[in-house]
Image (tube, rainbow, N blue to C red):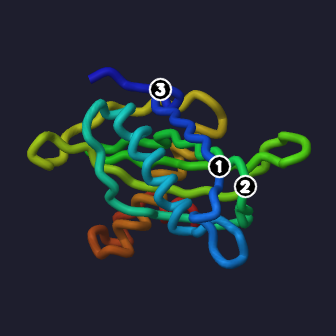
Amino acid sequence: MQPRTAFQSKTVVTDLVLPSETNPLNNLFGGELLARMDRAASISARRHSRRVAVTASVNHVAFNRSIPLGSVVTVEAKVSRAFTTSMEVYLDVWIEDRETGESIKANEAIYTFVAVDETGRPVKVPELIPETELEKERYDAALRRKQLSLVLAGKMKPSDATELKAIFE
């Protein structure tokens, strides 16, 4: 199985915020944004694994900036690390300034997907090779995030979480 780069999984979805997708303050519903991110992340995971990829968890979501009605929203997704059968996908959400066209980061999220075969059983995925400094930072941090999730779920002993222990030593 040939390793792949994060760039090979890059997925960009751009859309407009319509009235039916907004709350009483005329901002995009959070759930609508989560669905958009889930679709982009799914495509990214599928591009990396070349398999059907199912959402295993939404590890982190930061709604840092509201997204007003009429905004042009771009969701960028890339696999940030691949494990045995799972992939962490990092998402950045951008909105365009209406007057200047400048992109402003509004939100971010981290999802985990598992590649599955036609019967729904997990299958191995290719290794990920990070290239840029940001990709390398996200790649390194992904193992810490995974270990933290496993410890919190009771699937790993805190004493076995070597990456987490290293932070505090």
Circles 1 and 2: CB atoms closer than 8 Å: yes
Number of numbered tags placed on the structure image: 3
Disc 3 to disc 1, C-alpha distance: 25 Å
Question: For numbered disc 3, what is the local secondary structure?
Answer: helix
Would you call the spot at circle 1 few (<14 residues within 10 Å), some (14-19), or many (20 or more)?
some
User: Can residue 158 be seen at all in this image of the molecule?
Assistant: yes
Residue at the spot 66% in from the left edge and 35% down from the top edge: 133
Write down the residue under mark 1: 16
Type of amino acid under label 1: Leu
Quarter of the image with the N terminus is top left
Q: Earlier in the sequence, mark 2 or mark 3?
A: 3
Above or below, 6 against 139 in this view is: above
User: Which label belongs to residue 70?
Assistant: 2
**Given this view, does label 3 or label 1 mark the residue nearer the observer?**
1
Q: Position of residue 105 (x, y in %)?
A: 74, 51
Disc 1 to disc 2, C-alpha distance: 6 Å
Residue at the spot 51% in from the left edge and 68% down from the top edge: 31
Q: Position of residue 21 (x, y in %)?
A: 58, 64
Write down the residue under mark 3: 8
Q: Earlier in the sequence, mark 1 or mark 2?
A: 1
Residue at the spot 51% in from the left edge and 56% down from the top edge: 110
**Residue 169 in the figure: left or right of residue 101:** left
**Residue 80 in the figure: left or right of residue 113:** right
